[in-house]
Amino acid sequence: MTDKRLDALTDWLETFFGDENFVINSTSDDASFRRYFRVERENNTFIAMDAPPEKEDSKAFIKISAMLRVNNVHAPKIIEANLMQGFLLIEDLGNLTFLKALSKEKLITLYKKAIDELIKMQAIDCYNDLPLYDDTLLKKEMQLLIDWYLPKDISDKQQQQLTDIFQILSNNALNSPQVFVHRDYHARNMMMLDSEVTVIDFQDAVIGSNTYDLCSLLKDAYLQLEPIEIKILLQYYHQQTNSEIKFSKFKKQFELMGLQRHLKILGIFKRLSLRDGKNQYLDDIPLVKKYVLQIANKYSEFALLKEIL
């Protein structure tokens, strides 16, 4: 079957390099419509991104990459871009993801490095440059649970109960410190280069709760940390940011932010299967649902989630 996008990407690279002396191979797909290819040429390697312009916003990727790099966060350098076609040639950060680098002995040390990088991102002055993670967007995301994950015949009463829960979770997010939010900061979306954490997949960044990326990191949809590990790392973040919020309150903000994220993810993973044919994400639903039920069991205001789910 002909891959017209790959053919066009190859033609673009031939024009950029001025010849055909390179090899291009797929490296990974994405939960979005983006695809990534490794380009090898004269003992150098690059990453070519295919981001269909009608589906993905490459301008945001370029803009946020520059924002991160100027603030001493290692994001990939943009080498060349064709926004009309949706092609980018970017720095190759290698093959070692944060997830692959993890081991029992290095886990806390590596996660502290990831938190240090997160704190640097959260210090970026971005109020004139990024959209707000506002009430409308927070609720739109949670609505994915109803639209894709739950049966179509949930009752009007359950609909109202979910609406009330969504409001509680939105209020929690908006009533915490508002900072740069990567929005997908987890073990598969960081690379290790020369023992340092590097950041990818940041194009959907917004201004939102300081606990959102912590939830992505510590309550990862693809990797479960032990409760004691989460506590140690939460305390580390709380101390490193010199937070004036009591730790108990901060922890609840974190847990409720995680609930918002995980309700959304249940809907996204089901949609990826039903709409996009990416069935591999169904394997990750049990862990995400486990996170949801843990919070539903802990806080009485969310007990109804157990019945609904």
Image: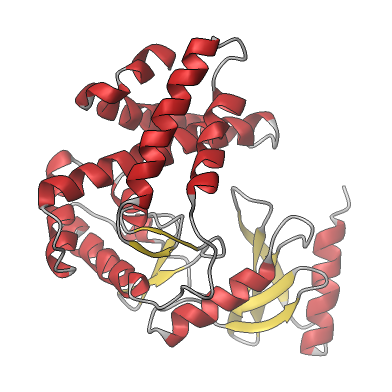
Q: Quadrant of residue 24?
A: bottom right
Closer-to-camera residue (146/246): 246
Closer-to-camera residue (122/226): 122
Looking at the image, the residue that sits furthest to the bottom is: 18
Residue 283: give x, y in percent of width and height.
Answer: 48, 30
Residue that appears at 18% across and 64% down: 109
**In the image, is 217 to the left or to the right of 241?**
right
**In the image, is 213 to the left or to the right of 21?**
left
Residue 17: give x, y in percent of width and height.
Answer: 77, 88
* Quarter of the image with the C terminus in it: top left
- Identify whether 52 is placed above or below 298: below
- Identify whether 41 is placed above or below 27: below
**In the image, is 10 to the left or to the right of 207?**
right
- Identify whether 78 is placed above or below 158: below
Closer-to-camera residue (235/210): 210
Residue that appears at 29% across and 65% down: 114
Q: Quadrant of residue 91?
A: bottom right
Residue that appears at 60% across and 70% down: 61
**In the image, is 303 to the left or to the right of 124?**
left
Closer-to-camera residue (10/158): 158
Q: Is residue 223 visible?
A: no
Q: Quadrant of residue 236?
A: bottom left
Residue that appears at 28% across and 56% down: 102
